[in-house]
């Protein structure tokens, strides 16, 4: 029974990923490289909740220095544009002290005016990268949990992530942090099995 439940959750997620590919095309959502130029840094500063944006800019500055020095700090980022407008940033990172099967969701930033469907599409595209280009088996994320300022926690729940624990007022008063998890190995097997036949036909 438990395995059937897991399989069903994986199936639902794969169905959403398939629909997302078409949705991104219709919405003119495209990925672009992270340059850490003024446009992208200003976007992060204005799109994120006050306090969190400062932490993110600090982390990105560290990442930029690592790249300049040829140091792999485990972070992989990219941006999303809708037409000419920058609407999001996403990615993932691994930590050297974690088991090799584990990866963490990177900073996710979305324009405050984009719809929940666009946010979900950017997150599902990030998941697609993890499934197709890495071999990590478990994805963990730290989610900002203040529903008066962000709907991202509900979006992750709709993407079949499981809540593991809540840290109250982690980011500040009434601003909790929730740790969530997704079993990548289960979803990857189903995703690759459903996409490879389509690639052969094309």
Image (cartoon, rainbow, N blue to C red):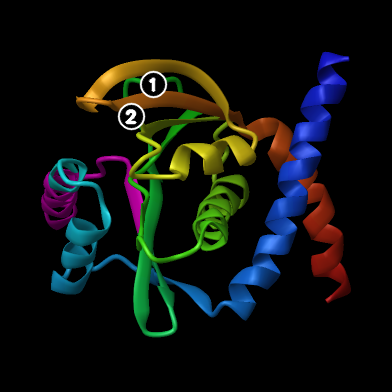
Around disc 2, counting alpha carbons within 10 Å, would you say few (fewer than 14), some (14 to 19), or many (20 or more)?
A: few
**In this picture, is 133 found above or below 190?**
below
- Residue at the extreme bottom of the image, as rendered: 84
Q: Secondary structure at mark 2?
A: loop
Identity of the residue drawn at 17% across and 43% down: 59
**In this picture, is 150 found above or below 109?**
above
- Range of residues picked out in magenta: 56-77
Q: Nearer the viewer, residue 104 or 116?
A: 116
Task: Return the residue at label 1.
Answer: 98
Q: Position of residue 53 (x, y in %)?
A: 18, 48
Residue 57 in view, yes or no: yes
**In this picture, is 164 found above or below 67?**
above
Identity of the residue drawn at 34% across and 73% down: 86
Is residue 103 shown left or right of residue 15?
Answer: left
Kindly identify which numbered label has been placed on residue 55: none
Identity of the residue drawn at 40% across and 44% down: 92
Identity of the residue drawn at 33% across and 17% down: 167
Task: Return the residue at label 2.
Answer: 95
**In this picture, is 195 found above or below 31?**
above
C-alpha separation, residue under disc 2 versus residue under disc 1: 6 Å
Around disc 1, counting alpha carbons within 10 Å, would you say few (fewer than 14), some (14 to 19), or many (20 or more)?
A: few
Q: Secondary structure at mark 1?
A: loop
Q: Dots 2 and 1: beta carbons under 8 Å?
A: yes
């Amino acid at each position: 029974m438990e395995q059937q439940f897991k399989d069903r959750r994986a199936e639902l997620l794969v169905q959403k990923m398939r629909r997302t590919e078409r949705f991104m095309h219709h919405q003119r959502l495209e990925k672009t490289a992270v340059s850490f130029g003024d446009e992208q840094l200003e976007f992060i500063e204005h799109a994120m909740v006050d306090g969190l944006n400062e932490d993110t800019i600090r982390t990105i500055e560290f990442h930029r220095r690592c790249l300049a020095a040829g140091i792999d700090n485990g972070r992989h980022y990219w941006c999303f544009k809708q037409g000419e407008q920058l609407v999001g940033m996403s990615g993932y990172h691994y930590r050297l002290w974690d088991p090799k099967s584990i990866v963490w969701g990177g900073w996710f930033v979305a324009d405050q005016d984009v719809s929940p469907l666009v946010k979900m599409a950017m997150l599902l595209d990030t998941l697609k990268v993890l499934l197709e280009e890495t071999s990590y088996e478990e994805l963990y994320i730290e989610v900002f949990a203040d529903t008066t300022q962000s709907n991202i926690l509900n979006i992750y729940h709709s993407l079949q992530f499981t809540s593991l624990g809540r840290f109250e007022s982690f980011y500040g008063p009434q601003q909790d942090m929730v740790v969530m998890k997704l079993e990548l190995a289960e979803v990857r097997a189903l995703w690759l099995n459903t996409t490879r036949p389509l690639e052969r036909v094309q």
